[in-house]
Image (spheres, grey):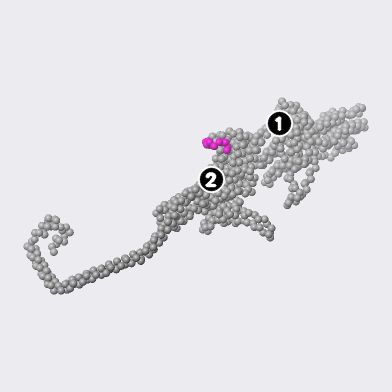
Amino acid sequence: MPSIFFSPNFTLSNPLTFKRISESEPSQVLLQQKLSNYIDIVEIDLCKHVAAQSQNVFQALNNLQWFQSEIQSTMATLEELKEEVNEVNDIHVKSISNTMKLQYQRDNLEAVQEKLQLISTMKHTMPTIDILLENKDFRGALHLLSEVEGVIKKDLSGFQCLRKMPVKIREKRESILKMMSSAFIEEATTIEDFTQIIDPNEYKFKTKYHLATIIRELLTLGNLTKALVDYRELIYKKVIETIRNTILASTQPVSSSTYDSIISELDIGSFQSRIKATYAKVIQISMNVKNIHHHIQVITRLSLGLIEQKNTIDSPENNTKSESPTFPLDLQLEDYNNFIISDESLVKQFRSELPRINRESAEILESVCSAAHVHIATLFKVREEKNRHLTQEDFTLLMDNAQNFINYMEKISPRQSYALLPTLLLQSRQFLETFHSKKVLLLRAILDNENWELENSVQPEFKEIIKILLSPQMPLQPQVMTPSKLTPPTKANSSNTITFLKIVIGDVTENQREAATPHAPEAGSPGVPLSPLPAPAPPVTHKFLLVQSALMFCKLIHEYLVLSQRLSLVTTDIVTRIVELFQLFNQCTYSLVLRKGALKVGSNLTKITTKHLAIVSQSLGLHIELIPTIKTRLLAQLNQKNAGLAADFDRLQVSFTNHRQEIYHKFIEIMQSTLSACFKNFEVDFDAKRASPHFVELAKKTQILHRTLSAYLPAQDIKLIFRQIQYSYTPLMKEYIVLIDTSASKVKERIVSDVSAFCATFNQMKGVEPINETELIGLLDLNQPTARNFMDNFN
């Protein structure tokens, strides 16, 4: 074959190719002729072979015709059989087959109808779920939704008309969870009034059945933790808003600076009423949070089978009364099984999560209480400067309410909050500092204007105060005297009320004893043995003459004691201030009287007399009696760590006692100076008919001192003072007598006569030890008496 026919571009439509094929070369023409001859040879050979086999071909055609006729005959027979079968089918089989077909169709239709009914039920179930949700029956709605989901998965799987139902069910469940969380928060933030509860730890909360159901379902669905997070944020904001709105008495939002300004400008009465209302509302919120925490603890444990039912059955053997089955939160027996989770896998899972849930619930309660403390402490900080200048009654009332609030909140929350307490402590110390500064200035003004004179009678209020101070068992009286009576005396009006004040120590009335001691149990009280009441202490009577400054000082001490009782946070600081006030009184009286400072401060005094000294000693004597009783009262308020403060009172008593001893020693010094003045030019006139003027003048001066002191000092002190005066006279007399020549009998007899007259006059004074005339005369003969320590005689 020519190679052109094998070319990939061979096509006769191409003129060049056609031309090459059609224009044959001579050699190619020869080749074509050869091929034509070959074809003829092949054709002749085929004809020979066909002629040789023609008989077989005709035989095959005959066979084919026979088969064709047989087939036609068979088809005719089959047609006849078909007609007969159709006739039999129409007569005998068709009715039976129709019956079976109809039965099959009926079964199919019934199955379809059942599916359609299920589909219809599913369609109508969704509105029913919505109705349950409107009635807040979340448990029923979730149960119904779970049944719908189960039916679709089991019986209606693959239905095109329900292909979107799983998505709708999932969305509906998520919607129900959100509604349950909202309902839980709504129930949890519904504030009930718990302000009348005395002890939150002993209060049994009533069951909120709807809330308990929501908690159980949230636990089952694993959404309780998220609901608690949302609840925590909301209740935290509610506490802050409640505090702000109650203090402002308005719900209008204000800026932070305006808020602080409004609080600081409130008068104390308005602030007291608003902060008290704030305490009540915060306590209500906290108690509601505690109620929710209690529900969560009980319902979660109950749902997981961690709380067993309690049931007491009538028993003739033990003769016990039948009681209704009781559970925490007063659930009834029929409610018990409704809360139990039956799925063991869920129970196992939730038991591992239970500690975390309870911890988060407890943290909500703690955070609410802590937030309340922090924001109330902020209110006090804003009013810090005003609070330190409040009156004693206003400030103690403010602190009492705050302390009561703290105590109550500590019973609500197991964890104590230290946000408010340091603020109260700081402001109590600031107030005490201001209070003490004012009282120090007041005491100085009172003492500087004191004239140390006795005029009118003591007011009954002061008597009551001193009785209270001398009797630690008697209760303090914060309202003994109005503030108007506490102003110091002025120079223009310096009359000081004073009388002979009788104080009975340990002699209290029966009513006072009952008020100061716990009530004894009634006779027959079970479990409490009867014991006799302690016998009252024997009455000890002390009499004191007091000037106005001493009475006012007692009033100040009483105020400090009332303050220590009301401000328990700073009792130790108050004890220190009381000691300082005692020291100030002692130092000022010492400087004003013994050191004659009163003559320089502008008072009406022109000189300090023995009467003034006696009056001061009376005031000191009262305070010496007061110090132990005040110490006893204060130590009862202190703990063992601060018991060392008792030594301060012991030192105070020693200081006051030494001060009084110096005053008594001053009396002796005065009489020693008097004797020296009387015997300055001592001479013996043995021819005179009357007693020596030296001895007469000394006896007269001694009697004057005795009359003065007898009007103010107790008998035992007078006896002690004049005993020391008597001892001091002997050596001084001898110093002057030895200057006289007593060898002459007349001189000696005259001196003995004068001494006898002096002793007779001295011994006429009441309440003093008589002078032994013989002993004195013997001592004047240079038989000196044994020296005695002056201080020892006064101990």
Which quadrant of the structure image shows residue 730? top right
Q: Quadrant of the C terminus?
A: top right
Q: Quadrant of residue 58?
A: bottom left
| Relative height, residue 553 to residue 294 (above, below) | above
Give x and y (percent) for residue 282.
59, 42
Between 17 and 707, the residue placed more toward the observer is 17
Is residue 761 covered in magenta?
Answer: no
Q: Residues within 10 Å of mark 1 (few under 14, many from 20)?
A: few
Which quarter of the rendering shows the N terminus?
A: bottom left
Relative horizontal placement of residue 140, taking residue 517 as reference (left or right): left
Find the distance from the CA under tag 1 to the CA under tag 2.
57 Å
Judge whether residue 734 can be spotted in this image: no
* Residue at the spot 33% in from the left edge and 64% down from the top edge: 90
Q: Is residue 83 visible?
A: yes
169 and 62: which is toward the camera: 62
The one of 680 and 632 positioned closer to us in this rendering: 632
Residue 702: mark: none
Q: Residue furthest top?
A: 492
Secondary structure of the residue carrying tag 1 is helix
Residue under numbered circle 2: 186
Bounds of the magenta span?
A: 246-256
Q: Nearer the viewer, residue 760 or 684?
A: 760
Vertical position of residue 86 compared to residue 264: above or below: below
Element type at marker 2? Answer: helix
| Amino acid type at mark 1 | Lys
Dot placed on the residue nearer the N-terminal end, 1 or 2? 2
Image marks 1 and 2: residues in contact by CB distance under 8 Å: no
| Residue 152 location (% of width, % of height) | 44, 55
Q: Where is residue 554 drawn, in percent x and y? A: 72, 35
- Residue appearing at x 84%, y 40% in the figure: 786
What secondary structure predominates along the stretch shown in magenta? Answer: loop
Say whether residue 251 is magenta: yes
